[in-house]
Image (spheres, rainbow, N blue to C red):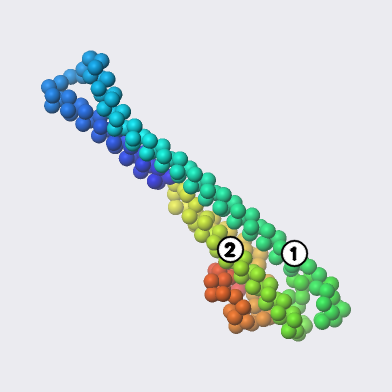
Amino acid sequence: MREFRFALLAFTAVSAFAGISYFLAMHTGGNISISSNNQDWGGFGSYIGGILAPAASLLAGYVVYKSFAANAYQQKLLLARESLSRLDVELERKLEAPFNNICFGDEYHGRPLRNIIYALSNNEITATEDASKGILSLLHNIAIMANSIRYYIGLLDGLPSAEKDNHWLGELEKSYWIEKYSAICSRMVRIVGQSALEDKVSKEQLRSFKLVLGGEYGL
């Protein structure tokens, strides 16, 4: 929006300059009053048209370009939002899926994975190697999702706007993920260990994990 205002101001300035320079030229030529001669006004129209037509074409092209860029940006945001929604649904499904391994006895067989994670983090049951591997794999997937969330937040911050007021959108998005997954992620990291997580994920994914899910996890 700010760029469009600048372009419109530049076009107005060119228009004013063209008109003023023409009338100055007429004044220099001895015309001190507005002419009633149609030929003079025809010449004025040709002069203004010759200057403003290219400027108007450039302005129109710029407006079309900015409109196309804004639409492309909106589409990118929409695709990113849809992808994150699918990842969110899939992660929630995994956490609520029944734990069908009998390694922790009949008491925990068939319980949601979320309950198993809470029991492990509370030391109610002892983590097995297979359980730790499964939780670490889930953490890896969450780190990948967190990287996508960070990319999406960056898009929100760069959303075209007349004012620099987009920061709150990113904060709102981050608060959603912190509220929903920070606590469970903190427990999972507690189970597998910080070093195991750092060895499993890339530096970029770890950075996103800390940034997006930094609430209770305290990273």
Left or right of 166 in this view: 99 = right
Numbered disc 1: secondary structure: helix
Q: Are marks 1 and 2 in contact (CB under 8 Å)?
A: no
Nearest the viewer among 161 and 217 is 161
Left or right of 134 in this view: 5 = left
Q: Where is residue 172 in the image (x, y as percent from the top left)?
A: 57, 58
Q: Quadrant of residue 80?
A: bottom right
Left or right of 34 in this view: 196 = right
**Residue furthest right as drawn:** 106
Q: Residue at 82% x, 81% y: name it.
A: 104
Please count the marks in the image: 2
Quadrant in which the N terminus is drawn:
top left
Name the amino acid, label 1.
Arg
Q: Residue at 58% x, 59% y: name it.
A: 173
Nearest the viewer among 91 and 47 is 47
Asked if one can make out residue 215 in the rendered structure from this viewpoint, the answer is no
